[in-house]
Image: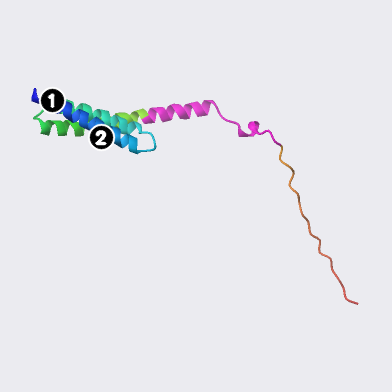
Amino acid sequence: MKKYIFSAGLVITLLFMANLSVQAQSRPVSDQAKGAIVGGAAGIVAGGLIGHGVKGAVIGGAIGAGGGYIVGDAIRRKKLRQRQAYLRAHPVHHYAHTTSIAAPRSVTTTTVTKTTNY
């Protein structure tokens, strides 16, 4: 019973800390970070239940976070490949979207006159 309470407390603490760090940032959380957070939380729970209390929870959390990061990176790469394939299939022609016609450039010429003194 103590293992369950301890593991639940660790998970709640980890999720609370992750929520605070997400709110402090102005940019969205990357897929790698999401994977590491979820993997670490799952690893803490599994390590705490399977292993030897705190030691098992720490080891499980580290392994889970590493595995979650790898999975999150694979998800990010898949999204990137999909986006690149979409952009290759749907090219954007910037010149077709212009509505105004540019005025011709004015060319200034200078002439040099030769003056003679008589």
Q: Earlier in the sequence, mark 1 or mark 2?
A: 1
Local packing at callout 1 (Cα closer than 10 Å; few below 14, some 14-19, many 20+) is few
Residue 117 located left or right of residue 3:
right
Per the model, the C-alpha gap separating discs 1 and 2 is 18 Å
Residue 59 in the image: state x and y as whole percent.
Answer: 15, 33
Q: Which residue is mark 2?
A: 17
Local packing at callout 2 (Cα closer than 10 Å; few below 14, some 14-19, many 20+) is few
Which quarter of the rendering shows the N terminus?
Answer: top left
Residue 76 located left or right of residue 107:
left
Give SS at disc 2: helix
Q: Which residue is mark 1?
A: 5
Looking at the rendering, the stretch of residues picked out in magenta corresponds to 76-100
Residue 97 in the image: state x and y as whole percent.
Answer: 64, 31
User: Residue flagged by tag 1: what amino acid is it?
Assistant: Ile
Q: Name the quadrant containing residue 114.
A: bottom right
Give SS at disc 1: helix
Image point 35% across, 28% down: which residue?
75
Q: Nearer the viewer, residue 103 or 24?
A: 24
Which quarter of the rendering shows the C terminus?
Answer: bottom right
Asked if disc 1 and disc 2 are in contact, CB closer than 8 Å, the reply is no
User: Residue flagged by tag 2: what amino acid is it?
Assistant: Met
